Amino acid sequence: MSGLLDRRRGARPAREAVPVVLTDRYSPLPRKVLVRVIGYGLLTLGTLLYLGPFLVQVATSFKTDADAVGNPVSLIPSPVSMAAWEIVAGSNPAYSVPVFRWLGNSFVVTISVTLGRLIIDSLAGYALARLRFRGRAVVFAGVVAVLAVPGVVLLIPKFLVLNELGMFDSYSGMILPLFCDAVGILLMKTAFEAVPAELDEAARIDGAGVFRTFWSVILPLVRPALVTVTILSFQGSWNEFTHFLVATSNPDLATMNLGIARLTAGDLQGSQQFPLKLALATLSTIPIAIVYVFFSRYFMRSGNATGLK
């Protein structure tokens, strides 16, 4: 009845609200997707900026001397030349570079230093984290204080000590001073402190000694830290230059970096030869890249691999 009266009075019936649906063509991009796109774009840009010099280095090693000077940042050699790599491989009798001797010395020193740091750093880190002995705080303060000392300051004392001990121009003089480092000790100490102390108590109740507890119970639980020390030790000792510079003057004991530096300052002094220099630099980079790729999955793991049973 009321509806009939409303019609006679001229009132219009109310219309039902129709929802407006925006098509995908005009809908705005969700904020999460936009943030992700921007993030991936920045990561891609950063990757290109980071890998750019390495790509230029590899490309230049296949260039001729004239092309390397005329087009220093070009990624396409024109023409492609293997002259630099022939010298590196020793197949060019006109130019002799003892690359394989340098590589052999580098591997001997690097592997020895890496193994030594794994043993000494882990033992020292376990002692500082678990054992209670007089002077432990002083020892830890000394380890931390070493990080504040610039390495350049120690060059002359290193030379004097090595010369006095008769270790100059020897593998022992190149290896032993690098057998442990403060960073590795601190990393291992932090990793051991993250392991529950109840595991040590349980091992001692079962009759295990200090070393057996360290070796069989605690050490397997800190594998991510061991892998981190391995990567850092290998990279640091492979790229070491200043210590080897004062530890040896014998060309037969030169490592890869030391040999490249002496070659550049000697036979290549005053000449450009960018392809040869960058070919040697590329060859020196390959072992570090292989080690990092091989251990990367362990390096990226979290240290939360410990637990109680």
Image (cartoon, grey):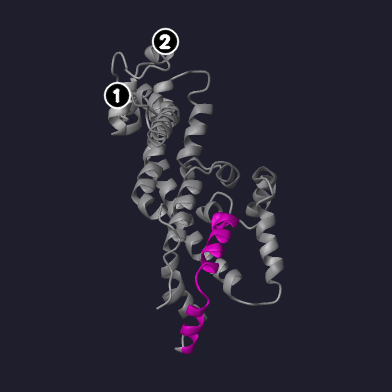
Q: Looking at the picture, how far across and down is residue 59, in whole percent?
A: 35, 23
Residue at figure coordinates x 54%, y 51% from the top left? 174
Up-down relation of residue 70 to residue 150 (above or below)? above
Residue 124 is a magenta residue:
no
Q: In front: 241, or 247?
A: 241
Query: Which numbered marker is on residue 7?
Result: 1
Q: Helix, strand, or loop for circle 1? A: helix
Identify residue type, mark 1.
Arg
Identify residue type, mark 2.
Gly
**Pointer 2: what residue?**
70
Q: In front: 44, or 230?
A: 44
Give the total number of marks visible in the rendering: 2
Q: Is residue 92 visible?
A: no
| Range of magenta residues | 176-205
**Residue 214 relative to residue 309: left or right:** right
Q: In front: 255, or 165?
A: 255
Q: Looking at the picture, how far across and down is residue 253, in whole percent?
A: 48, 45
Residue 190 is a magenta residue:
yes
